[in-house]
Every structure is written in C-alpha cells, then in structure tokens.
C-alpha cells in the first residue's frame, strides 16, 4: 500500500516533463520485472525440493535416479502409497502419531487455557517470577532433559508407552501454548468475563462459558501449533520408545530408510503422508494460525 | 446462605476484604495448579536430577553411584571432542541464523511488494512457507535423496560430490539444509511486521527525498528491530539445540565434522552408556542456553 502511494506521488511530481515520466514508468516496469524474477527464483528454492519429493513418490525406484532426471514420469503409479497404507507396521506409526499428538494437544489446551486465564485476569504473588520461568522454559535444551527423562520414564514404568511420550512432550508444548493463549486473552475486553463474575457466577463459569467460546480462533491456532510440535517431535520419540509398535511417524520414516534400504519412492510417499495432517491444518487455518503465532510467540 | 462476597457487602469489614483478596489469590493458584505441577515434574525435578548425575561416577545405569566432585566436568572440558562440537554448533547456528534473517527478510519484502497482484502474492507466500511444514525427518530424507552422489543436485550443478559424506563439505551442507528448513518462520513474522508499519512513515521519508535503500535502512529496519531481535534470539536458541536434522543426515560424521553439542551428548549417553559424563555435557549445554534465555527474557520484558 505504501509503495503505491509513493508511486502516484512521484508520478504527479514529474508530470512537468514527458521524458521524466517515461523514465519513471520504465523504472517501475523494471522494478516489477525485478520483483517477479526474485519471486520466481525464491519459489524454485523453496518449492523445488518439495516438487521433486512429490514426483519421486510416483516413480519407480530406478526412475528416481535416471539421467537426465524427469519431473513427470512415464510409469506414474500409486504403488508406493499403497504399500505404505497397506503395511500394518507403517499404518501403526500413523496411528501412534495421531494418538500421541492428539492427546498432547487436548491436554495442553486444557492446562494452558486455565493458566492463561490466571495470567490474563488475576494479580497474584509470584506472577512475574512464574512468567519469567515460562519464557525461560523455551530455552531449556531438549538434550538436557532427555537424560533425566530417560531415568524417570524407566523408573515410573512409562518406558515404551503412550503416557511416557505424551507427558514428556508437554514440557515443550505448554510454554508456547500459555504464552500464545495469554496474548490472545489479553486482546479480549475484561468486562466480558468480569460481568459474569459480578453476577455471582464462579470464575470457572466465566472462563468456560464466556471466554473460551469467543476465543475459538485463538484456541485453534494454539492447538495447531501444539499439534505440529508433537507430530514432529523426534528426539524423545527415538529414545523413550523401543518397539516398532510404539514408534511415531518421524522415527518410522527413518526406520523405513534403514529397513527397505533406499526404496526412495516409498520413503517419499511416507514423507508426504506424514506431512499431510500438518499441511491440511496449516492450509485450512493459516489465517488464524499466522496471526495467532505472531501475536503470541513473537510479540507476546 | 451467606457467601464471602455478600458478607463483605453486609458487614463491610476490612477483614472480609482481605479474605476476598486471599480467595482471589487462591483462585488464581487453582487455575495454575496443573501448570505448576507439570513444570515441577517436567522441569525442576529433571534439572535437579541431571545436575545430580553430573557429580556422580555412574548414573542411571550404574549400580553404585558415588559422588565424584568435579571429575566429570574436568573430563568433558578437557575432551577435544566437546570443543570441536562447540565450534561446529557455533558455525552451524551462526550461519543458519544470519541466513534465516537475510532470506526471511528478502522474501518478506518481495511478498510485501505492491508491484504484483494479490493472488500471485498469496500463491508465492504459500510456496515460500512450504519448507516450514515438513518435519526434520522428512527434510533429512528428502535432502539425502537430492544430495545423493547420483542425485539431482549433482546433476544440475554438473558436479560429482558426496555432499553429506565429504569432510570438507558436510558441515556446510547440513547448514544449508537447515537454512532451507528454517527461514519461513522469519519470513512469516517479518511479513506481519512489515504490514504493521504505517504507510505515512514511508511517504514522509519520500517527501524528505529518501530513496529506496535509505527508506529501507532508516524506516523499515528500525520499525522491525524489536521483532528482529526476538527472532534472532529465539532462532539462536532453537538452532543451537538442533538434533534431528543432523542425526538423520550425517549422524555427526564423517568422523566428527558435523558433530554438534546435542549429538555429542546423545552419543555419550545412548551409544557409550556413560550417563554421568553425558549429564555433565548436558548441564554445560544448559548453562550456555541459560545465557541466551536471560537475554531473551530481558528483551521480552523491555518490549512489554
């Protein structure tokens, strides 16, 4: 918008001479061409590899490394996808990931909504300290927590179980969720829920009956981000599970790479299938997601 | 039934007011109870445990765990492997973060340009965000395929190199892959920042005779500075902790040329089963991260 304003202004100023106007117009055209070239080069950098992944998932293995490489294959087939979707072992990876990421998302939202409510609407002793703790948790390296978690999870008999993964993932999802959710609640007028509390209803009622229903966009964006973190987690999934029936998608992709030594079409098909939940969530809800993310985690 | 509230209204006693305040404090802690419990179990206890491990001779797996003072710290700090990993982490992180900023800002500026229509901009934005939507495992296997000796990258560059297995190239290559994977976070945040800059600022600068580059350095950058500092700190924290991408592309190799602190520590624990020394390395990594955390917290508080 700003640039448009500048362009019109410049054109009016240089109206005196026809020559100046043409230079100005020429310069704008040059700038537009420059921008388009930049955008196309950027798109090749960003999307080229993804396109190649997609193309490879439909090829036969010999064709993937055929020279010269071809984007569109003669032997186009869904075989790799069918293999992934009909092998009980790989299907199990997806099931595990859905169970773990789904549960983590629900639990995180449940806990974070309450914490964000306290941060946004109450003054209490220790608020500043707790706020600093929650921001700092984001900086605690996963590798530092991994070693004691391994000890704890084994001691609590949660090794190689869903609860072991779900519980430990929450240390990463919770801080972001609380920060983003508090940011969202802060944008809503206090009068909304205070009025209900004044009428004698409890804070719980004010939160769940009034605040939560109008916060759906915020909750959705926090939920997506939480789901993405849990769906993508690798280090704990690798270390805190042992048997293949407990492995999640990221570990499954790596296992596939080892077991079926370089059946690249299957590995790429698995990669795409493993990215679909996040892709869909993102594409459908990117408006909520991006505004929620920038409002919460970056601007806090 | 008389609730504390009505009681306060009826009697108006200062004691009741205090009680009401107490109840409010109690209420807020009630809402925070699950969070506090989780933070205690998932943060405080483990950090105390890992510090404890670092002063023992055998931890987690060992039958006897005796106190050994600073012996583990001496061992880790005198291990050239630890310093090699620290240097690699700094290179990997520094180059990645700088490139994320430059690419993220460039793409954000391109996408913010009014010289092209709304629809093409939306399409390009969707394409540019793509790398962000893939998990490290997918990014790792994808680039292993692209960078294979007979892969498409070598074909396009007419080279014949083992990008991930060559001691000279491996660190630069994993850093490049990490750059590809990480710039969209900067781009999305900076784009939101650019759209928040009031148009009058640029107009005023134009009237004052500022050209494009001058407007960029004197209007755009100062306006974006708080976001940029936040992003740099966050990205520095995250990138220095990167594990999955390196583990699945090079595994820290060849030999130790791509070994970073997280892979170094992981191997101590889960390949050599020396949990005490691994814990020591993990505590050192925590200390380094806490420096960044302090900077980040101070920056966030300054912005409030």
Image (cartoon, coloured by chain):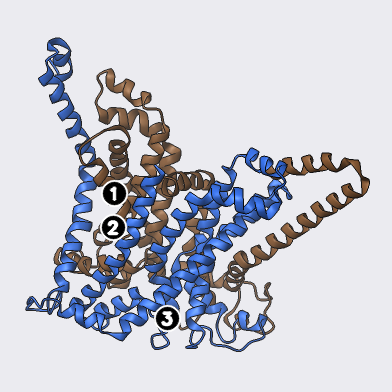
Chain colours: A brown, B blue
Residue assigned mark 3: B258
| Marks 2 and 1, how far apart at CA | 25 Å
Residue B252, x across and y down, in percent: 39, 81
Residue B246 is at least partly visible in this image: yes
Badge 3: how crowded within 10 Å, few (<14), some, or many (20+)? many
Residue A117, x across and y down, in percent: 31, 36
Q: Is residue A41 above or below residue B65?
A: above
Nearer to us: label 3 or label 1 = 1
Q: Which mark is residue A132?
A: 1
Label 3 sits on a secondary structure element that is loop
Badge 2: how crowded within 10 Å, few (<14), some, or many (20+)? many
Question: Which residue appears at 55% of the width and 49% of the height?
Answer: B222
The chain that hosts pointer 1 is: A
Nearer to us: label 2 or label 1 = 1
Label 1 sits on a secondary structure element that is helix
Q: Which mark is residue A108?
A: none
Residue assigned mark 2: A166
Q: Nearer the viewer, residue A240 or A138?
A: A138
Q: Is residue A72 above or below residue A38?
A: below
Task: Indicate which disc, 2 or 1, sits on the residue closer to the N terminus.
Answer: 1
| Marks 3 and 1, how far apart at CA | 34 Å
Residue B189, x across and y down, in percent: 52, 51
Residue lying furthest top:
B10
Image check: B147 left or right of A84? Answer: right
Q: Nearer the viewer, residue B98 or B2?
A: B98
Q: Nearer the viewer, residue A99 or A130?
A: A130
Instruction: Please identify the quadrant where the C terminus of chain B is shown.
Output: top left
């Amino acid at each position: 918008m700003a640039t448009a304003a500048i362009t019109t202004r410049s054109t009016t100023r240089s109206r005196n001479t026809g020559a100046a106007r043409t230079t100005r117009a020429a310069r704008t055209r040059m700038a537009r061409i420059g921008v388009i070239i930049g955008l196309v080069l950027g798109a090749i950098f960003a999307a080229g590899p993804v396109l190649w992944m997609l193309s490879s998932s439909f090829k036969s293995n010999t064709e993937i490394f055929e020279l010269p490489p071809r984007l569109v294959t003669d032997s186009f087939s869904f075989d790799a996808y069918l293999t992934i979707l009909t092998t009980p072992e790989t299907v199990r990876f997806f099931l595990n990931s859905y169970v773990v990421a789904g549960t983590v998302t629900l639990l995180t939202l449940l806990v974070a909504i309450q914490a964000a409510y306290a941060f946004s609407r109450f003054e209490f002793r220790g608020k500043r300290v707790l706020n600093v703790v929650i921001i700092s948790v984001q900086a605690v390296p996963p590798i530092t927590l991994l070693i004691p978690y391994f000890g704890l999870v084994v001691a609590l008999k949660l090794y190689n179980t869903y609860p072991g993964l779900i519980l430990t993932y929450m240390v990463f999802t919770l801080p972001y969720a609380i920060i983003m959710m508090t940011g969202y609640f802060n944008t809503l007028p206090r009068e909304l829920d205070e009025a209900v509390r004044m009428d004698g209803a409890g804070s719980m009622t004010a939160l769940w009956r009034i605040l939560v229903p109008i916060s759906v966009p915020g909750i959705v964006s926090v939920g997506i981000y939480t789901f993405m973190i849990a769906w993508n987690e690798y280090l704990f999934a690798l270390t805190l599970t042992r048997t293949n029936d407990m492995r999640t998608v990221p570990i499954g992709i790596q296992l596939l790479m080892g077991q079926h030594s370089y059946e690249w079409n299957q590995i790429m098909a698995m990669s795409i299938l493993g990215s679909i939940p996040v892709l869909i969530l993102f594409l459908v809800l990117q408006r909520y997601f991006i505004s929620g993310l920038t409002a919460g985690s970056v601007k806090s | 039934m008389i609730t504390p509230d009505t009681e306060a209204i009826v009697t108006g006693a200062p004691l009741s007011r205090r009680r009401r305040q107490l109840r409010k404090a109690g209420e807020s802690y009630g809402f925070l109870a699950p969070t506090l419990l989780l933070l205690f179990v998932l943060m405080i206890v483990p950090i105390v445990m890992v510090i404890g491990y670092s002063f023992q001779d055998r931890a987690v797996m060992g039958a006897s765990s005796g106190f050994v003072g600073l012996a583990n710290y001496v061992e880790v700090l005198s291990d050239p492997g630890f310093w090699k990993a620290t240097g690699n982490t700094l290179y990997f992180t520094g180059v990645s973060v700088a490139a994320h900023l430059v690419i993220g800002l460039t793409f954000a500026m391109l996408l913010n340009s009014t010289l092209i229509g709304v629809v093409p901009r939306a399409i390009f934005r969707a394409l540019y965000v793509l790398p962000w939507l893939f998990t490290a495992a997918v990014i790792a296997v994808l680039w292993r395929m692209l960078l294979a000796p007979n892969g498409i990258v070598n074909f396009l560059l007419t080279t014949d190199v083992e990008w991930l297995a060559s001691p000279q190239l491996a660190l630069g290559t994993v850093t490049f892959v990490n750059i590809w994977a990480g710039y969209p976070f900067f781009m999305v945040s900076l784009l939101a920042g650019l759209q928040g800059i009031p148009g009058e600022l640029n107009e005023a600068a134009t009237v004052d005779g500022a050209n494009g580059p001058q407007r960029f350095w004197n209007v755009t950058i100062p306006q974006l500075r708080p976001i940029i500092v936040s992003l740099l700190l966050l990205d520095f924290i995250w990138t220095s902790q990167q594990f999955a991408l390196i583990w699945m592309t090079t595994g820290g190799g060849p030999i130790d040329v791509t070994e970073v602190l997280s892979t170094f520590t992981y191997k101590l624990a889960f390949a050599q089963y020396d949990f005490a020394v691994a814990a020591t390395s993990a505590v050192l990594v925590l200390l380094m991260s806490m420096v960044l955390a302090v900077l980040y917290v101070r920056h966030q508080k300054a912005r409030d």
